[in-house]
Image (cartoon, grey):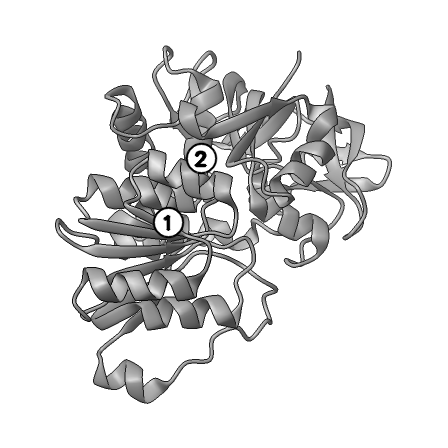
Amino acid sequence: MKTIAAVVYEPGKPIEIEELDLDGPQAGEVLIRYTHAGLCHSDVHIAHGDLEARLPMVLGHEGAGIIEEVGPGVTRVQPGDHVVCSFIPNCGSCRYCANGQQSICDMGATILEGYLPGERFPITGPRGQYGAMCMLGTFSQYGVIHQNSCVKVDDDLPLEKAVLVGCGVPTGWGAAVNTAGVRAGDTVAIFGIGGIGINAVQGARLSGAKNIVVVDPLENKREKAMELGATHAFASAEEAQDTITDLTRGQMADSAILTPGLMTSEIVASGFNAVGKGGTVVLTGLNKLDEQNIELPGSIMTLYRKTLKGSLFGDCNPTTDIPKILGLYQSGDIKLDEIITRTYRLDQVNEGYDDLLAGKNVRGVVVHEH
């Protein structure tokens, strides 16, 4: 069958809209009709070359849609099911899934190669085989993906909102709830209020944090953070540092969650300085894989027992945490409608990313036309 998709052919060049060929699903695979896709910063890292991926690649790793067809052996979903796609698949049987670390499932090792198990490329076109970002390629009208990337959701959930729970929402929410382990009465500092940082704010609020101090240079981002639970907002780390010191009588923050668009050594140092004894610094932002962006005083880390932790997908388990977060949305405890700034057609994807990089959007969503 044919599908229209947004493709990156060369780092630094505009994303191109192409008509491509799509195979039917094989064993363990499903055909999904994507209805919505989230504009997440990680796709920019591929388009700009910050992350080296096999190209050409159909971008998009936040997706929601409806299952059209299933291949042999598929048990997780059936035709007609509404699903949210997890950008990290979870097989349920590798070492990491078995010990509760589904966010680092072995199947996720090839998400930047873009092929399905067995090095299969369901998408082909004028330049041969096309990879799919995170084995999903949600910037396409249709996709063939593995059942391990699918999470069935309630039919009455609006997919244009639920789509965000495939990556950004659990990554931020889980960074606070799971990785930082925020507890009632804590002071939390959050650096960067985009699609991940705004949900770290929501996670910290739900966990009962007393002080949620956010840092972002853009006023619209700071205002949205205050609307959704932050207690203080600043344009710079220096301003935030003084307030954290005053709020805690010098004890400093219990945790700092770093969610910038591009992780730098300066941001890591700011987070490290914001936490006190026994404090935890959580890294979720990315940069080039070989970028050396952590340079900290080891003696201070030892003497103050500070911890630096990486967090992927908020240390969430897609199978249980995606429905859990959507349940919190249904009860009104997590806001999704309020963080969507604008929707776009697929052919507006470059405009959507220009808006993201310009700081105009907290979250943008692509609405697929069929």
Which label sits on residue 166? 2
Q: Report the residue that reaches farthest toward the right.
A: 126
Residue 195 on image: x %, y %: 47, 41
Residue name at image x 62 percent, y 35 percent: 137
Query: In terms of secondary structure, where does tag 2 sit?
Result: helix
Residue 5: give x, y in percent of width and height. Answer: 72, 29
Point out which mark residue 233 bears: 1
Taking the spot 72% from the left edge, 22% from the top edge, the residue there is 3
Q: Dot 1: few (<14), some (14–19), or many (≥20) neighbours within 10 Å?
A: many
Q: Residue 239: x, y in percent?
A: 39, 62
Q: Is residue 366 visible?
A: no
Residue farthest toward the left in the current orientation of the protein = 184
Residue 119 in percent (x, y) is at: 63, 47
Instruction: Report if residue 162 is visible in the image.
Output: yes
**Secondary structure of residue under mark 1:** strand
Choose between 320 and 12: the one closer to the eye: 12
Q: Amino acid at mark 1?
A: Ala
